[in-house]
Image (spheres, grey):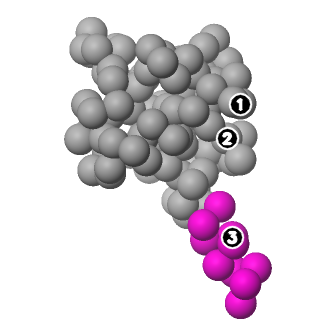
Amino acid sequence: MFSVARTVVRMNSQLTLASLVLAVFDLVRLGLPADAARLAGRLGIETVRVERALAELERRGLADASRARLTLAGLALASQLDMDRSARLFGLAPANDAPTAARHVA
């Protein structure tokens, strides 16, 4: 049971990080500033969770947490996540519990 709970927590964290990468990517494409409060509102989660997730993305080399900006590696991941999202939207990819590119965030 413990390993199942750990897997669920890891999956939730993974999906939160992937969702955050996409949210930053989307805001930048719209020409809107990204900050923890705006991202929290967009994702429907607490600001403190966004701040922690940004710090984790920075630790992984995917974001600059202080500026809420993606690095080149983060942009590459966001681009792949965006393609996965579009493919699922148009029924071009099999429906999975987690996006293909989200596995790279783990």
**How far apart, in angstroms, are the residues tagged by discs 2 and 1?**
8 Å
Residue 48 lies, in percent from the top left, at 39, 44
Asked if the residue at tag 1 contacts the one at tag 3, i.e. Cβ–Cβ closer than 8 Å, the answer is: no
- Which image quarter: residue 98? bottom right
Q: Which numbered circle lies on residue 7?
A: 3
In the rendered view, tell whether residue 76 sits above or below residue 46: above
81 and 58: which is toward the camera: 58
Label 2 or label 1, whichever lies nearer to me, is 1
Q: Earlier in the sequence, mark 2 or mark 3?
A: 3
Is residue 33 at all visible to an observer of this figure? yes
Task: Tell me the element at label 3.
Answer: helix
- Residue 100 horizontal side relative to residue 41, left or right: right
Task: Tell me the element at label 1.
Answer: loop
Whether residue 38 appears in magenta in the rendering, the answer is no
Task: Tell me the element at label 2.
Answer: loop
> What residue span does the magenta drawing correspond to?
1-10
Q: Which numbered circle lies on residue 49?
A: none
Q: Earlier in the sequence, mark 2 or mark 1?
A: 1
Is residue 79 at all visible to an observer of this figure? no
Q: Residues within 10 Å of mark 3 (few under 14, many from 20)?
A: few
Quadrant occupied by the N terminus: bottom right
**How far apart, in angstroms, are the residues tagged by discs 2 and 3?**
14 Å
91 and 60: which is toward the camera: 60
Q: Earlier in the sequence, mark 3 or mark 1?
A: 3
Residue 57 lies, in percent from the top left, at 61, 32
In the rendered view, tell whether residue 102 sits above or below residue 66: below
Q: Mark 1 — residue?
A: 60
**Which residue extends farthest bottom?**
1
Q: Image point 60% across, 14% down: which residue?
A: 71
Q: Which numbered circle lies on residue 105?
A: 2
